[in-house]
Amino acid sequence: MSLALPAGGLTAIIGPNGAGKSTLLSIVARLLPMDTGRVTIDGLDVTTTPGIVLAKRVAILKQDNQITPRLTVGELVGFGRFPHSRGRLTRADAEKIAEAIGYVDLSGLRDRLIDELSGGQRQRAFIAMVLAQDPTCLLLDEPLNNLDMKHAASTMKLLRRAADGLGKTVVVVIHDINFAACYADRIVAMKDGRVVVHGTPDDIMRSDVLKAVYDMDVTVHELNGFRLGAYYR
């Protein structure tokens, strides 16, 4: 596959299970080795760039984050500063941590243990951790997993705000095509390890395109300026 994403904005990667979406994100973040080819971020080759340098350009939030439940929100978010502090937090690091926690509206829960949070609050804490890392690019692998409609919408609004207000390049793997249609600037549709099509939501949210991606009929409706898919039957 060959794909180039411009800096800034929010890109959603969609496609059926097994399409290679999470694998692609892991290769970009150097969590998985590539068999061949080349990946660059801001002109830096991810294979040869020192990890500490790469970590200042890109952060990834996986869908299964294994941490000790006895961490507080503040301690978790502090991990995001490691590429900058090497584990010795400075006053500047403390300011970045507080800023990230405030950005996701968890200031009042800074000393709360992670396992005492709701699912939506926990996801915001993890997003605060990658924001505290202060990279140019955020990669999020299925961040809406196990979230109800309200918290899923809140998470997408937060990511949209990070792209617009903080100037981050946000790339998110997502299963809900309607969230992709409403919040993304670009959609990349994958299937069988390949990019089937990519473009604006209007380019992708078409019945013929979605049929080719998902092998099922999806009726697309215009609603409040968005093209949304009905696929529950």
Image (spheres, rainbow, N blue to C red):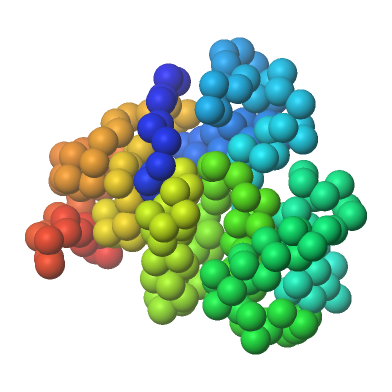
Q: Residue at x 46, y 75 (%)?
A: 151
Would residue 153 be visible to someone looking at this image? yes
**Residue at (40, 31) in percent of width and height:** 5
Q: Percent x, y for residue 123?
A: 60, 68
Q: Is residue 40 left or right of residue 202?
A: right
Question: Which of the pair 183/49 is nearer the observer?
Answer: 49
**Observer-nearest of 12 and 103:** 103
78 and 16: which is toward the camera: 78
Is 210 above or below relative to 148?
above
At 88% from the left and 53% from the top, the residue drawn is 87
Q: Is residue 210 above or below residue 147?
A: above
Q: Is 142 placed left or right of 101 in the picture?
A: left
x and y percentages locating residue 128 in the rendered image:
62, 64
Dividing the picture into quadrants, the one containing residue 233 is bottom left
- The answer to which image quadrant residue 94 occupies is bottom right
Residue drawn at x 71%, y 18% is: 48
Q: Residue furthest right?
A: 88
